[in-house]
Image (cartoon, grey):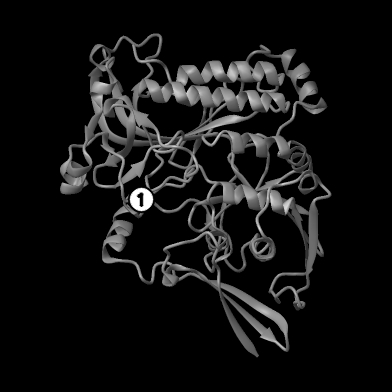
Amino acid sequence: MVHAYFTLRQLTWENIDDSELPILEREYMQGVLISEVVLDRSFSGSSKKAKRRQKKTVRETKKPGEAIIKGHRSYDLMLSLQLGIRYTVGKITPIQKREVRASDFGPRASFWMNFPKEGSRLTPSHPAEDFKWKDYCPMVFRNLREMFKIDAADYMISICGNSALRELSSPGKSGSVFFLSQDDRFMIKTLRKSEVQVLLRMLPNYYNHVHTYENTLITKFFGLHRVKPSSGQKFRFVVMGNMFCTELRIHRRFDLKGSSLGRSTDKIEIDENTTLKDLDLNYSFYLEPSWREALLKQIKTDSEFLKSQRIMDYSLLLGVHYRAPQHLRTRASYRRTMTAERLTVLSEEDAQEDDAFNYPEGLVLVQRANDENSVVVGPHIRGSRLRSSAAGFGEVDLLLPGTARVQIQLGVNMPARAEQIPKEDDSKSFYEVYDVVLYLGIIDILQEYNITKKIEHAVKSMQYDSVSISAVDPEFYSERFLKFIQTVFPENS
């Protein structure tokens, strides 16, 4: 029996200590691959400073979802998915990088592999039942991963490492199953066959869109696969970036469409993992004017793209981290919210001389750090940093007292002020105001306005106001969506 160890390294990596690289352990018997394990040693040589930072930023709350351990209903499915992705990444990564071609797209640009339980010369043995693995457009998704600076080794460690995936309860009506990687970086979602067909159809234009607009807010897709167990149904999966991959607690999350029919949660008890909807939103969020302008411009660009693809029923997923509560602020005194004068900007020297704990609670901006390792990076690392008028339109980081220093990008780590929306019959002169950090993106972008949706629109229009329902023509959907988002992020007066 032979043990072989391979260090997973991309040719583009430089100045990285070998002790930080993960190891792929493969076990062979008479030349046949019988097992494969990804070993993570990324923290073995961490400095004391890095360990302290890691300990300080670790979440106090329990991670969402249910760990998929042996005996779990999705255990075999998870093993099949991990084996398939490990095979896919290992097969495509050594191929020399090149520009994608027309032949890389479409349903024919796929390959399949049998994974027998006892293993083969190309696949390891495994405890799950025999299954067939299908990988769609591998070169396209390999380039997309590299476009968003996702290293192949990190990708495998996140999804295929020794730690189990976690299964999340489905927040919507689609019945999809959601898996979350152990480090929260990646979300894996089951798709209907029709959704796979839509993604394959729009993939060339999607690729061009995310390549052209580095700050795009639409869902980032990193892999499209299918698993067919020998005794069961086919499962189709897409791997996506998790928009809420952050060390900060997401206290509230909203799924916003701009429609009103059925757009409120029916849960009596609401916690941090509850997905709220349009009618549940009782706050407006005020951004620095230049950031608001950039955000609305990008949302419009993304919405125009989805309209051109005949896509509707998408949502703005909004995550809110509440900082220091500031109750009983008058509306009159609050109107200066998020103007340049309201944001404190410290110099690089000031930020290095003092610890974050010594700053008052709230939102503090600091000039961009020279040391990239000192900044906690959000999941959308491809986008450019935002500039602040308070810093002379220079690039800035957000200093969070007692937590960390983070990069500010469009849709990631965005500081804002949240003002409670008064009800029409509310005569109070004081309202709750919060410092918040926002995370957002556009999700559920695989629903075409097809014959089924047209029938749904016709039927519901006979019972309800046609403006209030979700199933509408993509052009009207885009117009209504943009109008609603402008009310979520109003102008400072």
Q: Nearer the viewer, residue 15 or 441?
A: 15
Count the numbered circles shown.
1
Q: Residue at x 38, y 9 (%)?
A: 425
> Horizontal placement of 204 versus 27: left or right?
right
Q: Position of residue 396 (x, y in %)?
A: 32, 36
Q: Is residue 233 visible?
A: no
Instruction: Say which amino acid is labelled 1.
Output: Glu
> Horizontal placement of 128 versus 260: left or right?
right
Which quadrant, please, contains the N terminus?
bottom right
Which quadrant, please, contains the C terminus?
top left
Please, is residue 19 above or below residue 331 in the view?
below
Q: Position of residue 464 (x, y in %)?
A: 68, 14
Q: Nearer the viewer, residue 75 or 474?
A: 474
Please, is residue 467 above or below residue 328 in the view?
above
SS under mark 1: helix
Q: Is residue 93 visible?
A: yes
Q: Which residue is mark 1?
A: 372
Which quarter of the picture shows residue 292? top left
Q: Position of residue 73 (x, y in %)?
A: 65, 60
Q: Position of residue 88 (x, y in %)?
A: 69, 61
Q: Would you call the spot at circle 1 few (<14 residues within 10 Å), some (14-19), or many (20 or more)? A: few
Q: Residue at x 75, y 12 (%)?
A: 462
> Horizontal placement of 415 versus 307: left or right?
left
Which quarter of the picture shows residue 251? top left
Please, is residue 196 above or below residue 7 in the view?
above
Q: Residue at x 68, y 61 (%)?
A: 95
> Horizontal placement of 300 versus 408: left or right?
right
Q: Nearer the viewer, residue 328 or 413?
A: 413
